[in-house]
Image: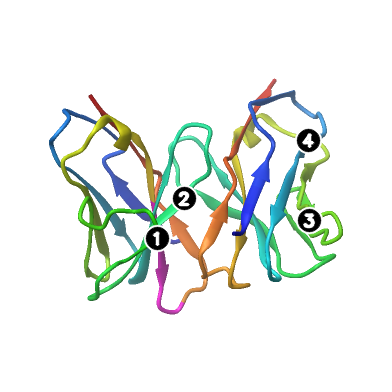
Amino acid sequence: GAVVSQHPSWVICKSGTSVKIECRSLDFQATTMFWYRQFPKQSLMLMATSNEGSKATYEQGVEKDKFLINHASLTLSTLTVTSAHPEDSSFYICSARGQRRGKLFFGSGTQLSVL
Amino acid sequence: GDSVTQMEGPVTLSEEAFLTINCTYTATGYPSLFWYVQYPGEGLQLLLKATKADDKGSNKGFEATYRKETTSFHLEKGSVQVSDSAVYFCALSDGGGATNKLIFGTGTLLAVQP
C-alpha cells in the first residue's frame, strides 16, 4: 500500500530555534498534503492544507508566519516551526492524498519538545 | 462547529475480551464517519467508515454503525487480540467524502494483554 514517510519522529530543540519536519509520499504523487497537531489529551487538529505549487491554506488560529509550509514537489512537503517556544511542543502528523486516489495516507508523526 | 468526542483511554483488556470504544459527534450537515487505527511507530490507517445513517462499517472483525438518532459511531469487536493494541481515532468528514477535511477525536489507546 501507499506509504508516507515523516521525519524526524522525535526532536528536542531549544527555545528560539527553528525545526523542520519532512513528509514524503514514497510511491505516489501527493497533490494535497495536510498537517495536523495534537496536544496531550486533545484532538488531532488540522493546521493547514497545502496543494503542490501553491500557498498553503491555514486553519483559523494557526499563525502562517510561525508554521511555514512548503509543498514544492509532488512527493515532499515540509513544515518549519520558526522560533519555537515550549507551547509549540506537540505531536505533528502529516497526511497525503494523491491525484487519483481518494484515500488519505498518514505519516507516523513527529513529537516536538521545545525546552 | 463540528466535533468528535471519544472515550478516554487507556482501555486495557485481556485477549478474547469484547471491545467497545465510544464515539459521538456533533455536525451540522450529514458527515461521513471513520475509524482510524495507529499501530506503534506507524501512520494512521483507515480501519472502517460509514457514509450515511444506519450504514455499518466493518473490517478485520471491527464494526461500527452510523447512528444518526444518537449521533454515535461506537467501535466494537467481539474478541480482541494482542495485535489489536493500538491507538484508535474516531473522525468525521465535513464534506461527506474521505478526501475532505477530517475532524478527529482525541484517540483511545487500547492495550490487549495475553
- Indicate the amino acid at tag 4: Leu
Mark 4 or mark 2, whichever is nearer to me: 2
The chain that hosts pointer 4 is: B
Let me know if marks 4 and 2 both belong to one chain. no
* Residue on which disc 2 sits: A45
Q: Residue tagged by mark 1? A: A59
User: Crowding near pointer 1: few (<14 within 10 Å), some, many (20+)?
Assistant: few
For disc 4, the marked residue is: B19
Q: CA distance from mark 4 to mark 3?
A: 20 Å
Q: With respect to residue B83, does B27 lie above or below?
A: below
Q: Which residues are magenta?
A: A94-100
Q: Could you tell me the amino acid type at mark 2?
A: Met
Was residue B2 drawn as part of the magenta stretch in this picture?
Answer: no
Task: Point out the tag, 4 or 3, that comes first from the N-terminus.
Answer: 4
Alpha carbons under labels 1 and 4: distance apart:
35 Å
**Residue contact between numbered discs 4 and 2, judged by CB atoms under 8 Å:** no
Disc 4 from disc 2: Cα separation: 26 Å
Chain letter of the residue carrying label 3: B
Choose the circle earlier in sequence order: 2 or 1.
2
Secondary structure beneath label 3: loop
Disc 1 marks which amino acid?
A: Glu
Q: Is residue B81 left or right of residue A99?
A: right
Callout 3, which amino acid?
A: Thr
Q: Residues within 10 Å of mark 3 (few under 14, many from 20)?
A: some
Q: Is residue B34 above or below residue B83?
A: below
Q: Position of residue A79 (x, y in %)?
A: 25, 53
Left or right: A1 in relation to A35: right
Of helix, strand and loop, which mostly describes the magenta segment? strand
Quarter of the image where one finds residue A49? bottom left
